[in-house]
Amino acid sequence: MKILVISESINVEDSSGSKVNVALISNLKKAGFQLKVLHYSHKKIDLEDIECVLIKENKFSLNYVLSRAVRVFQRNTKMYINTYLEKVFGFSFTHTNDTNSIKRGIKKHLGFNPDLVLTLSKGSSFRPHRAMLKLPELHQKWMAYIHDPYPFHMYPRPYNWVEKSYEVKEAFVSAITQKSAHLAFPSLLLKEWMESYFPSVANKSVIIPHQIKTETQTAPLPDFFTRNEFSLLHAGHLLKQRNPVFLIEGFLRFLDNHPSARSEAKLYLIGSHSYHEPVLKPYFNHPNISIKDYLEYKVVQALEKEVPINIILEAVSEISPFLPGKFPNCVVANKPILILGPYYSEVKRLLGHQYPYWSEANDVMAIEKNISELYTIWKNNPEELRLNRQDLIDYSTEVNLKQTLDKILLK
């Protein structure tokens, strides 16, 4: 079976979306599918034993000229006019030029004659999906992977906001759900969430969770990390909605209640945190808290395997339909996951409602209690700190992936 993958990026260092794209592509190869990957990463990238073709940006178009004119204008005037242009045109000139470039790249490789065309995006872009809407001859083979809710006014609170071009964006997603032959979501809750807005989701959707992909080359641990401590790690972008203050307060309460832990416990926050810098600044020199910027992906994976506890921090909300990109890495690390998020969350659903180390993201008392329980286990026998969820490992590997796609391709 042949799959043509159109991925916005396969550069694992540019976003969490690109990381999960590469993990999915790698497992498609492991599952035995014949692949050709077209990508718009803006630089040549090779994946082992997979044919990867860089789609180049078209720099000889009106949209390209207009996009650069807007960029220069905004840089010189400090006036951000793209949102107003999007209200008129629906999308920025850059987005439109990128979309047309991807469309042109796809048309050059139709001789591959795939059984399935899979579009993968990152962030809120969905450029490959928009390109595919312009290629109706491929719609009967098209699987659109929708990794997050969209448009933004359809996000759960507190992520939701209304774009000036919200009507165009809503019609855009509606067209994807209607014209694609298949839809894929990383999470069951996300599929149900999007189905509540777009009824077409109901009868053409499959769940393809983010895939396990571990680095074959082990990376050295960073100099700031100390082995054999009671280390708790949150690795990932601290978005505006992911407030780390309650986690820090719970950790500090834990230290107050366990004075001996001050010499052997540390909380690591690794990733972009610019929005929260004002509240994090007092802890930059705290002996038990280490706050660092972005680290290379393979270094983060090495840390996730080394620490006793990994943390998944979500927003204070009623529901979190997202499956974090790092979830499969945390599962395969085989360490307990401290979950801070709403009762209705995909992470909590997968781990089970009886999973003990969950709390609301702003429940300082519960956070402290869970950390204390984990610390007691670590003190008595660190080897007992194991997640031991082979079912979740199986859920996120090429075996389940192949079974899911075979049901579609063999019809």
Image (spheres, rainbow, N blue to C red):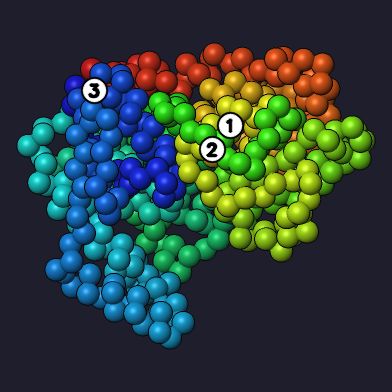
Question: Disc 2 on helix, strand or loop?
Answer: helix
Query: Where is residue 399 shown, x and y percent of the image?
Result: 38, 15
Q: Residues within 10 Å of mark 2 (few under 14, many from 20)?
A: many
Q: Earlier in the sequence, mark 3 or mark 1?
A: 3
Q: Mark 2 and mark 1 in contact (Cβ < 8 Å)? A: yes
Query: Where is residue 27 shown, x and y percent of the image?
Result: 34, 25
Horizontal placement of 188 versus 340: left or right? Answer: left
State which quadrant residue 118 falls in.
Answer: top left
Q: Mark 2 and mark 3 in contact (Cβ < 8 Å)? A: no
Residue tagged 1: 304
Residue 188 at least partly seen: no
Of all residues, the one furthest to the front in this rendering is: 223
Residue sitting nearer the eye, 273 or 296: 296
Residue 146 versus residue 293 in the image, above or below: above
* Residue displayed at 48% across by 33% down: 219
Horizontal placement of 13 versus 229: left or right? Answer: left
Residue tagged 2: 300
Task: Estimate the spatial distance between the alpha carbons at disc 3 and disc 2, rounded to whole Å.
Answer: 29 Å
Type of amino acid at the residue the image marks with label 3:
Phe
In the picture, the quarter occupied by the C terminus is top left
Residue 88 versus residue 127 in the image, above or below: below
Task: Estimate the spatial distance between the alpha carbons at disc 1 and disc 2, rounded to whole Å.
Answer: 6 Å
Task: Estimate the spatial distance between the alpha carbons at disc 3 and disc 1, rounded to whole Å.
Answer: 30 Å
Mark whose residue sits in front, 3 or 1? 1
Q: Earlier in the sequence, mark 3 or mark 2?
A: 3
* Residue displayed at 51% across by 37% down: 299
Query: Where is residue 216 shown, x and y percent of the image?
Result: 40, 26
Query: Where is residue 136 shown, x and y percent of the image?
Result: 17, 45
Q: Residues within 10 Å of mark 3 (few under 14, many from 20)?
A: some
Type of amino acid at the residue the image marks with label 1:
Glu
In the picture, the quarter occupied by the N terminus is top left
- Numbered label attached to residue 33: 3
